[in-house]
Image: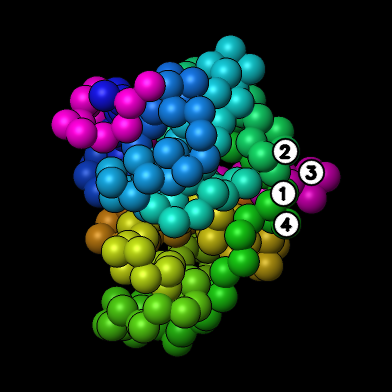
């Protein structure tokens, strides 16, 4: 059996919502990529993280079908869980800071997986969208208040892997921030919240609140 923990990342100000994240602290217990992908598929979260070196912050990120060099909500969640000031992903080193109960990471926009950023005329239009058919990863967004930098967003991965809508997506918010060149407060999904901002050297920061789940040992899932 493989132990894992569940976090909710990018919770709203009231501690609700957030995107669930599976974290396998003992990444060495699942050394093969195929086994990691299988475990991620069985757990069914949008991403599952395997911690390969807890002291150096080396992590490996998997969706139910893909390995990702970088993703936002896994990095924010693991940074909160391990209490580190940096993480090492396949894409590169991710800086971490904490402020006002938030955990924030900074990364390069080019590390984010490709996303179609599709702007709509109003928050109501975004909220009324139906889930599109698989094929394109769409980040639908609209200004709630452009002067204040508040955004309403929803994310549709389009991978056909059972994750029809992603509750909170750090990498897409990072890309949107890079495109707009300004700090944003993003409300995504049912009520998750992401805070972002440009940083020196072409980096972008994204962060939010993390709430712990509980350690679990799933029957029949992964072993080493």
Which residue is painted at 57% across and 49% down in the image? 68
Q: In front here: 80 or 3?
A: 3
Q: Is residue 59 left or right of residue 190?
A: right
In the image, farthest residue toward the left: 219
Residue 151 in view, yes or no: yes
Disc sitting over residue 110 in the figure:
4
Residue mark closest to the camera, 4 vs 3: 4
Which residue is painted at 40% across and 78% down in the image? 134
> Pointers 4 and 2 in contact (CB under 8 A)?
no
Which residue is painted at 28% across and 83% down in the image? 130
Sequence-wise first label, 1 or 3: 1
Q: Which residue is mark 1?
A: 108
Sequence-wise first label, 4 or 3: 4
Q: Quadrant of residue 2?
A: top left
Q: Which residue is mark 2?
A: 92
Sequence-wise first label, 1 or 2: 2
> Pointers 1 and 4 in contact (CB under 8 A)?
yes
Helix, strand or loop at mark 3: helix
Q: Is residue 103 magenta?
A: no
Determine the CA span between mark 1 and mark 2: 9 Å
**Category of crowding for the residue at label 4, using alpha-carbon neighbours closer than 10 angstroms: few (below 14), some (14–19), many (at least 20):** some
Q: Is residue 180 left or right of residue 83?
A: right
Determine the CA span between mark 2 and mark 3: 17 Å
Q: In front here: 14 or 31?
A: 31
Q: Which residue is mark 3?
A: 200
Helix, strand or loop at mark 1: loop
For the record, the magenta segment spans 198-224
Sequence-wise first label, 4 or 2: 2
């Amino acid at each position: 059996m493989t132990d894992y923990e569940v976090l909710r990342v990018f919770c709203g100000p009231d501690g609700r919502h957030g995107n669930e994240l599976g974290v396998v602290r003992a990444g060495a217990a699942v050394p093969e990529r195929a086994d990691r992908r299988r475990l991620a598929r069985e757990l069914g979260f949008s991403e599952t993280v395997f911690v390969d070196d807890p002291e150096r912050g080396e992590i490996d990120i998997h969706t139910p079908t893909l390995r990702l060099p970088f993703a936002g909500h896994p990095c924010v969640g693991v940074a909160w869980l391990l209490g580190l000031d940096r993480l090492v992903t396949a894409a590169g080193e991710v800086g971490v800071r904490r402020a006002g109960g938030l955990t924030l990471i900074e990364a390069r926009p080019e590390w984010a997986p490709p996303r179609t950023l599709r702007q709509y005329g109003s928050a109501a239009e975004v909220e009324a969208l139906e889930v599109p058919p698989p094929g394109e990863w769409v980040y639908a967004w609209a200004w709630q208040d452009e002067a204040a930098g508040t955004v309403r967003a929803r994310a549709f991965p389009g991978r056909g892997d059972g994750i029809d809508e992603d509750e909170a997506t750090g990498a897409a918010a990072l890309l949107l921030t890079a495109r707009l060149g300004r700090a944003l407060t993003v409300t995504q999904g049912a009520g998750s919240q992401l805070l972002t901002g440009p940083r020196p050297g072409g980096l972008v920061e994204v962060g939010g609140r993390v709430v712990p789940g509980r350690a679990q040992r799933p029957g029949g899932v992964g072993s080493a």
